[in-house]
Image (spheres, helix red, strand yellow):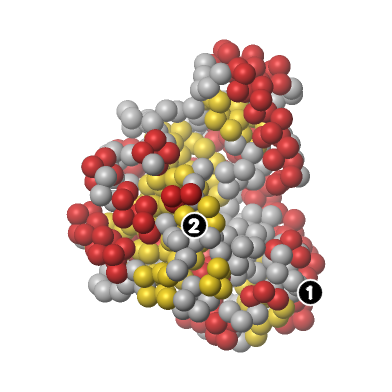
């Protein structure tokens, strides 16, 4: 096991990693920007090192500064968390070139699966169903127009690299496609240094279901079942749930087996998530694989009783997964609400500022993952998520009753948050029936 680990992230996930390390007996080093220097969780680390000014581009995204801090602190490993450099293969190479273990997959696996076109080709080879797509990057706009006319609208324009909803455009006709291609290409180039695009047929009224996997260095890959992440706005998730409602056991089993096949084909080790679309008939299609721990990992931890952060660190240290697939069970229902400092009534506009009152809920089966406290300033420089509210109960009805109570109990003032829309969503008849899809939020609100 590692003796000292550097956490190359901030906020809630930095604190989550720090806690896992403490329980594993690993000393911790937290890097931080000048703007984050007063964060309370830094006091829990064995050491903290400032790596630059408040802008992420000058601190949390500076590979050379993070590596320098790791070398000064003499760490064995670096955990990237999620976001920032977590899926940057160059960062993984830089860590290992410096004889520091990167807590994540190999850079080869990251490059393979981070290139959505290569990942789709691997899925096809692994007999994992793909959404109909352009079978490669688009050479020019004329090729895109011809393919869309052949397959039929609507289609999705997607960036071959990256994620997070950037470089994506939904188009319903040729005029919209011609207009969207240059904008998507420019956004992809700015975000991922690659303007490569491809087209994908839109699977209408589909649900977004993802499978959590974990692989060790001995070639063993296990799944920890699925999560439904259909409730989104602008391709950003709002509410996640496990097990996925309205998913039959046969589809669940095939989804999970497909995720494991893909991970094995990529020679994957570490935590990862294979994402699918599931249509109304229960047919599923591979979308992409995220080569990191996900924001929504706590609901999987709650229903499987496995600490995914701890296993991620253990397998990075070379330890084998000691359990077998049959040892991993789903128990009960877990639901997560992402509490963002955003105003749903103003098109989810970010609302940075000082939080004067922060009173999280509690009780049986309630978990709040957050780094926020009363009196804290929410910076406009970073992601607007300030907390994750997770509930776990034996049945979906009990989980929803608990969630309803927790959302009423949660007080965050004066900053507008997504709590208000969460309370509306979980009372909607279609949500209560588990009958939602990725367009539900935008159609309804």
State the separation of the CA atoms marked 1 and 2: 35 Å
Q: Position of residue 374 (x, y in %)?
A: 46, 78
Given residues 176 and 393, the one toward you in this image is 176
Specify whether 40 is left or right of 438: right
- Position of 358 with respect to 123 (left or right) is left
Q: Say if residue 218 shows up in the picture.
A: no
> Element type at marker 1?
helix
Q: Residue at x 65, y 50 (%)?
A: 110
Q: Residue at x 40, y 45 (%)?
A: 231
Q: Is residue 143 above or below residue 246?
A: above
Q: Quadrant of the C terminus?
A: top left
Residue at the spot x=61%, y=87% of the render?
46
Q: Quadrant of residue 389?
A: bottom left
Q: Position of residue 438 (x, y in %)?
A: 42, 38
Residue 73 in the image: above or below residue 379: below
Quadrant of residue 8 within the rendered picture: bottom right
Foreground of the two, 239 or 299:
239
Say whether residue 430 is left or right of residue 180: left
Q: Residue at x 56, y 26 (%)?
A: 171
Which residue in the protein does label 2 denote? 342
Crowd class of label 1 (few under 14; some 14 to 19; many from 20; radius 10 Å) = few
Front-most of residues 16 and 39: 39
Disc 1: which residue: 68
């Amino acid at each position: 096991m590692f003796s000292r680990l550097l956490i190359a992230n901030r906020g809630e996930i930095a604190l989550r990693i720090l806690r896992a390390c403490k329980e594993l007996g690993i000393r911790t080093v937290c890097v931080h920007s000048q703007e984050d220097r007063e964060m309370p969780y830094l006091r829990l680390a064995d050491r903290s090192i400032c790596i630059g000014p408040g802008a992420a581009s000058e601190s949390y995204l500076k590979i050379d500064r993070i590596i320098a801090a790791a070398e000064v602190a003499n760490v064995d490993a670096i955990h990237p968390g999620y976001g920032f450099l977590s899926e940057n293969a160059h960062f993984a190479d830089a860590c290992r070139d410096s004889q520091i273990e990167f807590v994540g997959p190999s850079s080869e696996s990251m490059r393979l699966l981070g290139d959505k076109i290569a990942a789709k080709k691997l899925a096809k080879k692994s007999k994992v169903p793909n959404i109909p797509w352009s079978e490669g990057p688009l050479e020019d706009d004329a090729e895109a127009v011809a393919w869309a006319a052949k397959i039929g609208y609507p289609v999705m324009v997607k960036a071959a690299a990256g994620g997070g909803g950037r470089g994506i455009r939904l188009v319903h006709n040729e005029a919209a496609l011609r207009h969207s291609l240059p904008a998507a290409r420019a956004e992809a180039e700015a975000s991922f240094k690659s303007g490569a695009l491809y087209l994908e047929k839109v699977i209408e009224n589909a649900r977004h279901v993802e499978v959590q996997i974990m692989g060790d260095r001995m070639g063993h890959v296990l799944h920890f079942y699925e999560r439904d992440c259909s409730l989104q706005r602008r391709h950003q998730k709002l509410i996640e749930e496990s097990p996925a409602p309205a998913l039959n056991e046969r589809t669940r089993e095939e989804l999970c087996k497909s995720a494991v096949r893909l991970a094995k084909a990529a020679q994957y080790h570490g935590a990862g998530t294979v994402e699918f679309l599931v249509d109304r008939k229960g047919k599923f299609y591979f979308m992409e694989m995220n080569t990191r721990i996900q924001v929504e990992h706590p609901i999987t931890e709650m229903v499987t009783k496995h600490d995914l952060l701890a296993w991620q660190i253990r397998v990075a240290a070379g330890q084998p997964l000691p359990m077998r697939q049959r040892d991993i069970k789903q128990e009960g229902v877990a639901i997560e609400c992402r509490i963002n400092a955003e105003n749903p009534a103003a098109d989810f506009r970010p609302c940075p500022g000082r939080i004067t009152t922060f009173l999280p809920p509690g009780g049986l089966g309630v978990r709040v993952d957050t780094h926020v406290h009363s009196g804290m300033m929410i910076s406009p420089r970073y992601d607007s998520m300030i907390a994750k509210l997770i509930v776990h109960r034996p049945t979906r009805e009990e989980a929803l009753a608990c969630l309803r109570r927790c959302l009423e109990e949660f007080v965050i003032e004066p900053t507008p948050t997504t709590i208000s829309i969460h309370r509306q969503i979980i009372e909607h008849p279609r949500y209560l029936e588990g009958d939602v899809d990725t367009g539900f939020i935008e159609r309804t609100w």
